[in-house]
């Protein structure tokens, strides 16, 4: 299965990217193809027009859209900023047609340096998933105290938190595989 992880923070010295790296390592170890789409590397300007109607699309946007289209499922990893997910995530999603995410499973992961793990951002991302026609998994992964749980390279450093990562990942992969299997059966 082809899984795209959108790392949604563009902030200098961001901490949430380490979670995207960690999840990519974890899921790759379960024999899935994983690619991180790092919004900090794309530098998309504020959306003026959706991609399919844009007369002069920003650099990298067509490539980003193709990667989204070709992914079977997604993880959105975002820190919580002022009670919600990043503007960069909303901006990137808004550039695309709604059907790019339609009928695909999207797991949400929120990240903070504090104790609550960004649960308000996770809930807001769940609403965005529904808005673009995706299938949100009911289980979210709020990652509080991120610097005590993942190092800069994405290595999980808190053995107790591995239970949360495993449970979330199992739920995400179970639903993703079921949806992909159903789509494949419909084609045959």
Image (cartoon, rainbow, N blue to C red):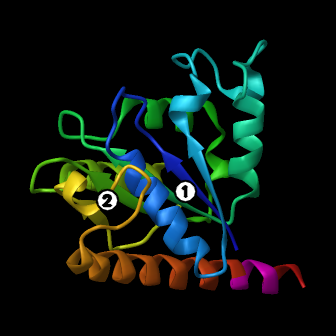
Question: What element does badge 2 sit on?
Answer: loop
Q: Nearer the viewer, residue 11 or 63?
A: 11
Q: Is 119 covered by the magenta stretch?
A: no
Instruction: Identify the residue shown where x is 70% and y is 84%.
Output: 182
Residue labelled with disc 1: 133
Where is residue 188? Give x, y as percent. 90, 85
Question: Does residue 88 appear in the picture of this structure?
Answer: yes
Bounds of the magenta span?
A: 181-185
Q: Nearer the viewer, residue 35 or 128?
A: 35
Q: Label 1: few (<14), some or many (≥20) within 10 Å?
A: some
User: In the rendering, which numbered label is found on residue 150?
Assistant: 2
Where is residue 40? Give x, y as percent. 51, 31
Q: Label 2: few (<14), some or many (≥20) within 10 Å?
A: many
Please state if 33 lies on the left or on the right of 90 as rendered.
right
Instruction: Identify the residue shown where x is 44% and y is 62%.
Output: 22
The answer for how far apart the CA atoms under marks 1 and 2 are is 31 Å
Closest to the camera, between mark 1 and mark 2, is 2
Query: How many labels sit on residues?
Result: 2
Q: Nearer the viewer, residue 170 or 149?
A: 149
Q: Which of the 4 image quadrants contains residue 187?
A: bottom right
Question: Does residue 106 appear in the picture of this structure?
Answer: no
Where is residue 99? Give x, y as percent. 67, 50
Please state if 164 lies on the left or on the right of 180 as rendered.
left
Q: Main secondary structure of the magenta part?
A: helix
């Amino acid at each position: 299965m082809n899984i795209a992880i959108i790392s949604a923070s563009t902030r200098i010295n961001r901490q949430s990217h380490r979670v995207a790296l960690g999840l990519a390592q974890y899921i790759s170890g379960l024999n899935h193809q994983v690619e991180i789409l790092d919004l900090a590397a794309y530098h998309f300007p504020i959306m003026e027009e959706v991609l399919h109607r844009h007369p002069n699309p920003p650099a990298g946007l067509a490539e980003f859209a193709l990667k989204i289209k070709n992914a079977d499922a997604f993880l959105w990893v975002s820190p919580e900023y002022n009670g919600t997910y990043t503007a960069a995530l909303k901006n990137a999603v808004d550039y695309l047609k709604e059907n790019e995410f339609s009928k695909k499973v999207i797991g949400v992961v929120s990240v903070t340096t504090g104790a609550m793990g960004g649960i308000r951002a996770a809930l807001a991302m769940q609403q965005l998933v529904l808005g673009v026609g995706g299938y949100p998994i009911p289980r979210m992964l709020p990652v509080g105290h991120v610097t005590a749980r993942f190092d800069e390279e994405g290595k999980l450093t808190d053995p107790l938190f591995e239970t949360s990562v495993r449970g979330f990942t199992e739920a995400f992969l179970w639903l993703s595989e079921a949806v992909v299997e159903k789509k494949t059966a419909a084609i045959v």
